Structures are given as structure tokens and as C-alpha cells.
Amino acid sequence: MTELRVPARSVAPDDPVPEVKNVVLVMSGKGGVGKSTVATNLALALTRMGTRVGLLDADIYGPSIPTMLGIAGQPTSDGKKIRPLERFGVKLMSIGFLLEDPKSAVVWRGPMLHGALLQFLKDVDWGALDFLLLDLPPGTGDVALTLSQKVHASGAVIVTTPQEVALQDVYKSVSMCHKVGIPVLGVVENESYFVCSGCSMRHELFGSGGGQRVAEFAGAPLLGQIPLHPSVREWGDAGTPIVEAAPGSETARAFVSVAEALFDRLLAQEDPGVLSIDRSGGKNRHLPITR
Ligand SMILES: Nc1ncnc2c1ncn2[C@@H]1O[C@H](COP(=O)(O)OP(=O)(O)O)[C@@H](O)[C@H]1O
Ligand SMILES: [Mg+2]
Ligand SMILES: [Zn+2]
């Protein structure tokens, strides 16, 4: 087997996770569009490609990683660092692991929230990783801002669904990224279509073209389209994401091809010449920022 060459971000001297080659934010202005579903399945797809992956459930208000990966329990500590839990080869940390009652709400706000996030980066023993994926809460304006100040992320994966009502909020998270200098790596359109068992046709229940429009707005590629399929939710609820549970299924393969497109995009981005070129003919008001 030839070794996979993994791209790497540049790391500042005060970076909280210097041994992590890529920090990827999974975000969307909107809740319920499938951020956690995409984050977990991407994590597994990247692991299956042979890379070392960590997943940080940064959705402090609605942690769903413990359920989606079927894992509970208290992380232990060596007195200095918290040891992440591990499932399907992915290192995991979630506020959900630290709550005594998973149904109880976390009432932290503002500075506490940001402090907790930074702690999860800094004080967890992630070790050397190729990818650390962050599953962000919806409406992530200030979380994205905080993160952008603390860690030089490789960039963001924006998750959307096709319908117009979802798009407005998603545009906001894209422009937030542009403003704080987080490169948008690409867009994932979730719940794109439904393959009908009656007529085997693709039904676009929520319309079409939404992901593409967000991608154009972001000046980034559409990394892929994920079908709407009951098995995605079923496996998510059962604690084994579909990429692990049914890797040969059409839906799992859609996630794998998103992971591959993301990998390629990171490789391309690593070339310092790539991001600074404005290919929009001046249409992009915010030029991607190179640091
Ligand atoms: N492609 C899909 N097909 C079917 N159900 C999905 C799909 N994507 C997400 N879901 C389900 O929709 C719900 C919301 O997804 P989730 O990933 O929790 O969204 P978010 O993290 O953006 O709030 C979950 O129950 C999940 O299993
Ligand atoms: Mg979520
Ligand atoms: Zn049909």
C-alpha cells in the first residue's frame, strides 16, 4: 500500500492543536440540516481512507455525537490532559460525555462557551491527527469568530439542504467565514434527492440547485450531494453511521466521495498559489485570504 500524502495547514506558535494537520469546521447557519450526520460520516470515511481522525462535538447546546456514534462514558484524565474516547477508530470528545444527565440543558453562554471550546481543543489529548473535524452548533457566528482567533483552521465545510428557506441562513455562515478569514473548503448538499422504491426515479423533494447556489456564493466547490434516505436516520439513531454500517450503499458512497473531494480540495489549497487566485473575474467581493 502506498502511503497517502496528507495535506497540512500552517500552524502558529500558540496553536492549541499543533500536531493536527487539518482542522475542519463543519457548519451551517441552520439547525437540522445534517451537520452532525455529515461530520460523523465524513470522519468515518476519512478513517477508512487510512487517515487518523478526531471528531469534536462543538455543539455544546445540542451534542449529538454520543448518540450517533453509540458511545457514552466519562473520559479519563492523566491529571494533565483529558483522554478522548474512541469509536470505530475515531477519537471523540463531546460535552455530552461530561453531562450527568444527557437530557439536561447546558446553560452556558458567551465566554464560558468559548472557554469550553478552547479547552476541548487544548486540554484533550488528541495526539497526532490528520484531521480534526469540529461539529459546530447552528448559527455559529461567534463560535466561528472565536475559533478563527484561536486556531488556524484549514477551513469550513458548509452543510445545506436544497430548499430556499434553508439557504438564507446558510449564506450568512458563508459570509461569516469570509469576514473572519476562514476558507470555505466546499459545500455539501444534504437531503438532495430521494430514490423512490416505487419507480426508481430520483425525486427532488426539497427542490434542486440550492447546494450549487451556496457553492457559487462561497466561491467554493460543491463537494457532493447526499440522498435523503431513512437508513441515514436509522443508523444515526442506532449509533453506527451509515458509512460504517452499510459502506456499499449509495448513500455511504455519496459520503465517501465527499470525503475524497474534501481531501483533494485540501491538497489543492496547500499550494500557496491556489487560494490567492480570484477565478470569478472580480465577482468575489471577499477574496479568499491567504495567511
Ligand atoms: N440524508 C439524510 N437522510 C435521512 N435522514 C437524515 C439525513 N441527514 C440527516 N438526517 C436526519 O435528520 C436529523 C437531523 O440531522 P443532524 O445531523 O442531527 O442535523 P444538525 O446537526 O444539522 O442539527 C437526524 O435525525 C438525522 O438522522
Ligand atoms: Mg448537530
Ligand atoms: Zn416514484
Image (cartoon, rainbow, N blue to C red):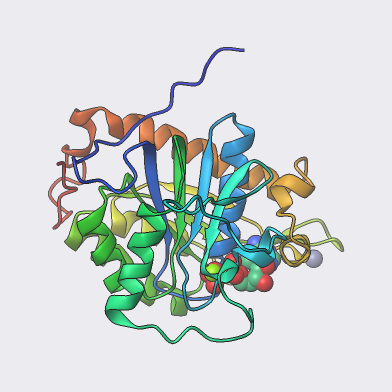
Q: Where is residue 97 drawn, in percent x and y?
A: 59, 67
Q: Report the residue at 61% width, 41% height from top.
A: 45
Q: Decide if residue 24 is on the left or right side of residue 248.
A: left
6 vs 158: above or below:
above
Q: Decide if residue 263 is on the left or right side of residue 140.
A: right
* Residue placed most toward the observer, 180 or 205: 180
Q: Report the residue at 74% width, 55% height from top.
A: 240
Q: Decide if residue 152 is on the left or right side of residue 66.
A: left
Q: Decide if residue 185 is on the left or right side of residue 42.
A: left
236 vs 246: above or below:
below
What is the residue that sits farthest to the top in this orientation?
2
Q: Is residue 166 visible?
A: yes
The quadrant in which the N terminus is found is top right
Residue 71, image quadrant: bottom right
Q: Where is residue 132 drawn, in percent x and y?
A: 45, 46
Q: Is residue 33 visible?
A: no
Report the number of discs: 0
The quadrant of the picture showing ligand 1 is bottom right
Q: Where is residue 204 drawn, in percent x and y?
A: 63, 65
The quadrant in which the C terminus is found is top left
Q: Report the residue at 25% width, 65% height from top.
A: 146
